Amino acid sequence: MTGLLLRDAEIDGRFRADVRVRDGRITEIGALTREPGESVLECGGGALLPGLCDHHLHLHALAARSRSAMCGPPAVNDPSELARALQHAAPDAHGWIRGVGYAETVAGDLDAATLDRLGPHRPVRVQHRSGALWTFNTAALAATGVATADHPGIERDDEGRPTGRLWRADDWLRTRLPPSVPTPLDGVARTLTGFGITAVTDATPDLGPEALAAFDQAVRDGTLPQRLHLLGTPLDAAPSARARVTTGPYKIVIADSGLPSLGDLTGRIAAAHRHGRPVAVHCVTREALFLLLAAFDEAGTVPGDRLEHAALIPAETIEDVARRELRVVTQPGFLADRGDDYLRDVPVEDHPDLYRCGGLLDAGIGIGLSSDAPYGPLDPWQVMDAAVQRRTRSGAVAGPSERITPLAALRAYLTDPRDPGGPVRQVRSGVPADLVLLHTPLAEALRRLDADQVRSVLIEGRVMSGVTSA
């Protein structure tokens, strides 16, 4: 691989130096002279950072968003706008309409009858913005045979008829929907690169062979240049042969729509630990958190066990989380995106508990920031700003005591995907050259957390060209 000299970069926000990259790694830092055949990137004193890591997103769902109709705010805000979005949406090759991003503020609790009234006369399915719920119209229910199925996520009325609402049934639905392949990840990869993201953790649970193969292919052929950490790899699956694909904690979902028994949750945690894997547990309600802490008391904890989302952490449980040495991967970007809904719908006494950051750090709990895209805003700089400002769209502040500094927010994106909330990666000789060059010194960038600060991105020492922001 041709060498690259990054000239006059700011390192650690403290000093300026030249950085030599060869064979995908940093080889020297100091006052360096260009070597024959070496390319040069003039940095002009801009901050050179380790590449950002989004510690929780869903790549294939993010890619599928590009072929879906947006059905929620800010694009769609009332029933007439929803009807227009569905009527004008392009069907897939099988004649289905796929909608995403729905929120109850648009047209209330969506069901089959509402979709029949508002949508076209073809199979329609609309995903709630949380990702936990799909709503089918009558044509879609008929096409998938839901009426005679017995999946526990199928919601039924008092007479036993499907309402059209299917909770956490994605795996089952894949066996009923028309065949499809995962949407290519090239567009998502370009957007990630434009934001300065060089590593991602895909948090999709229970990945099947097709999804795992698609990830492996995307990394192998360079469609996805980012390092990839997977939470949904089955316990009995062999690890990927790709050095840039790693297996993380085992993803467990505590469903909002129905809590598991203590014995079931304890058993799942213990099974993962027996396979040598910590767990990453989806936990968004106080009831789920109390149950999880009790399950950890039964199963025990191992290094790397972590909470995903931690949308509500009551003050009295912070010490319990810290004592068990759990990490928290959270998404304060939700406060900027839909914080007004939380402040309206969540009891006032729970507002300080929403997407905590500062209180967790003060208690010595390591946190990793992330997007949960496509369900939350993908832009890491927007997420960082949300952790600092905690402002909703209307300008209200959700939990001011949980604000953190811009530097703390940035550091929560700079930890290794295998260790969110752990030591911050640094620009040093010998480390992989997954790097982000900013237009300005670090101190100036921290005063205005914005994606337009990103000037260049290196992955494995290659300057990525044609990158875009979304």
Image (tube, rainbow, N blue to C red):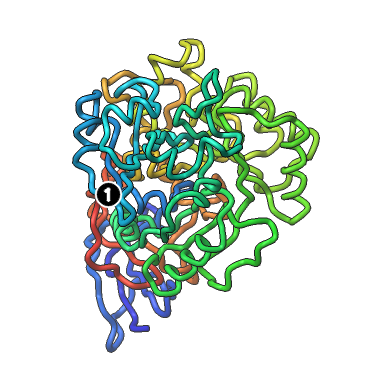
**For this view, does 36 lie left or right of residue 55?**
left
Residue type pointed to by label 1: Pro
In this picture, is 60 found above or below 85? below
From the viewer's side, name the closer residue of 279 and 9.
Answer: 279
x 71%, y 33%: residue: 323
In this picture, is 179 found above or below 23? above
From the viewer's side, name the closer residue of 399 and 157.
Answer: 157
Name the element at disc 1.
Answer: loop
**For this view, does 70 lie left or right of residue 424?**
left
**For this view, does 269 lie left or right of residue 363?**
right
Q: Position of residue 343 (x, y in %)?
A: 39, 16
x 29%, y 32%: residue: 72
Q: Position of residue 394 (x, y in %)?
A: 26, 20
Q: Position of residue 395 (x, y in %)?
A: 27, 21
Quarter location, residue 239? bottom right
Quarter location, residue 111? top left
Q: Position of residue 101 (x, y in %)?
A: 34, 36
Q: Is residue 336 visible?
A: no
- On-image quarter of the N terminus: bottom left
From the viewer's side, name the closer residue of 149 and 203.
Answer: 149
- Number of numbered discs visible in the structure rendering: 1
x 41%, y 49%: residue: 61
Q: Is residue 157 visible?
A: yes
Quarter location, residue 128? top left
x 28%, y 27%: residue: 117
In this picture, is 462 found above or below 133? below
Farthest residue in the bottom direction?
36
Q: Which residue is mark 1?
A: 91
